[in-house]
Image: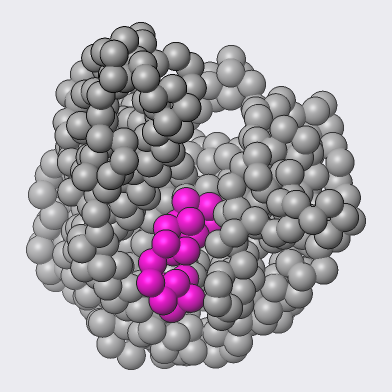
Amino acid sequence: TDDRAWLGEGCSQTQLAAAHGSGAAETSDDDDRPAWDSKVQYVLAQVGFSVGLGNVWRFPYLCHQNGGGAFMLLYVFLLLIVGVPLFFMELAAGQSIRQGSIGVWKHISPNLAGIGYSSCIVCFYVALYYNVIIAWSLFYMGNSFQYPLPWERCPTDVATNDTVKECASSSPTSYFWFRKALDITNSIQESGEFNPVMTGCLLAAWAIVALAMIKGIKSSAKVMYFSSVFPYVVLFIFLIRGLMLDGAMEGIKYMFYPKLEIWGNLQVWRQAATQVFFALGLGYGSVIAYSSYNPVHNNCHRDALMVSCINFMTSVLATLVVFVVLGFRAKTIALGCVAKNLGLLNLMISSEPNQHALGTGWPWINSTDQSVVSVAEYRQWYAQHSSDLGPTITDCSLEEEMNKGVEGTGLAFIAFTEVMALFPASPFWSTLFFLMLLNLGLSTMFGTMQGILTPLMDNFKLLARYRTVCLLGFILGLLFTQRSGNYFVAMFDDYSATLPLVIVVVFETTSVAWVYGTDRFLDDIEVMLKWRPPVVYKYLWKYVCLLAMVGLLAASLLRMVFKGPTYTAWNQTAASEMTLEYPGWALAMIIMLIILASSPVPIGYLHAKLRQRGSLDSHGEQGGGQEMHRELYTKCNSTELLDSRQQTPGEEEGAYPRTAFLPIGSEQYRLLPQQQEEEEEEEDTGV
């Protein structure tokens, strides 16, 4: 109990320091802190950070693989009971304390100051590989200014004057991605030399980020006006264009067809919770950093609901676009299959003309005019006569093509590029698409960088130089520009960020709900917003959110242990992808990255305990110190002070000092009754 009380009391230390010298320090600190030029700028920044590449290439895949409309309902349910409360918690903490992630969690609970450091490390992990994806988008955008597009058809082998075998065995888009863009090795164990073109693209990506960070949020916020809005323009253009395509309705039908049985699958719940978690950017510290530049009385509750809603609607819009395009792709492939089979059937009939006339030959279908035979008609005919046709004639299933779900880089750089090549004026559509990916990536990248720079700027001004961070990011990012670099991107994305982020949010929720206290937190929000949020947040933070995050952490760990970390590799000989297990050194690297990102929390706790013990020893020898001030004073406003003077001493007995962390209104510090004998020492503090 004493230890927990000490944890909670840590919040008054900064206020004591701020109050020293008649509050001048606090005022100057707030005046010096940058601020958003407008509310629109702030909302665009939060939306730009939360809406990223995952909305385009992860959510549609999960929706398709896990029951369509049923998955969306599950996602909305988890968004409301877990996502919005945690998002609101981070917004409120950042806005009220007005510091980055390190300062916020140190302020709320000194024993859990390591949470902020873990957030910074994970943010840096994400920045390292996220900028590589931006570099890939730059590469593809640069190659889009050609007609025909370089991935539209297979190249010719100069030696044999025939189509390159690897391309013929896969597809032109797969060949361009794996061989031309990445020049990938067969496994993570074959590192290969650096890819010079991708290294140049990575340098350009970091240069763009550095330019946007020159004046902090002042410069990055101006870029946000374009980088946050432009993707929506492109998505609507693609949606309108896609709805005109043959197969669009089939794609939408597959998207929304509900399969309610998926609600009984625990893995689907895990995937939905993970998507909610990453969609809102929880745990990175970027949400806290952005909100720390807000006015103290800004309505962050409304912001939490608005940004969460925009994020979900963007996911739905992106899913519509993806399925419209994939429906067109599947229909095109299925019609090509029908034409190919009818061509083969026509050849067979022409080679044996008498069999059909005698009624003992091939079952009849109009194989001469292939344009009048639909996929449904062909499938019906094939179902009736498949036993008579032999292995040469095959089925052509549109459903099978739609079921080949693609996600991540496979969706963006293989499936979508294949569709772009089928459009009239394909270079225009390709350029537009990759410019959209570039802006989606950059807006998220800006938020990630603020998650690194803001806490460093608040605590270690010498380290908070954007040039230093960007240069270090580029140097370490060279790991991903090797020929095996794509495998390291997958490693960081799947393991180095996921588990540490969940751990961070578990500790964030614990520190607010059980260490600081939900009632005190809601009291502080009430002072900040001038109204009290619904009491349901108290129970969501204390029980629902915490249990959900612990469950997600346990499910992720169990899946990692029992299934074993694997990755998808491209085999050049087979011209296909295959799943491989990570070698021992790669597993050690994964474990090291997770430990490095998670270790600041226990280290910070031990460090705080040692400082506490040292402070108590010092107080015993010297008669007090800064740590003692935390126990001597509690903050109250002028009204509370007047009320306290009217109380009898007996009424105050047993009252526990409540420490708020909000620098709002007229504030004074009231001497606690049990420390009357320390009055002279208090006068020396200048409070």
What is the quadrant of residue 544 in the picture? top left
| Membership of 418 in magenta stretch | yes
Percent position of residue 580, x then y: 70, 27
How many numbered marks, from 0 up?
0
* Residue 421 appears anywhere in the view: yes
Q: Which residues are magenta?
A: 413-432
Q: Going 69% across and 38% down the picture, which residue do you hit?
A: 575
Depth check, front residue: 557 or 637: 557
Residue 34 visible to the viewer: no
Relative placement, left or right, of 589 versus 410 is right
629 lies above or below 331: below
Q: Quadrant of residue 320?
A: bottom left
Q: Look at 84% across and 51% down and name the residue there.
A: 160
**Quarter of the rendering occupied by the N terminus:** top left
In-image side of 196 versus 210 (left or right): right
**Image coords of residue 675 (percent x, y):** 40, 54
- Give the residue at x 46% y 44%: 407
Nearer the observer, 326 or 334: 334
Its colouring scheme is one colour
Residue 10 lies, in percent from the top left, at 46, 54
631 falls in the magenta region = no
Rendered position, 150 above or below 347: below
188 relative position to 419: left or right: right
| Along the viewing direction, whichever of 73 and 507 lies nearer the viewer | 73
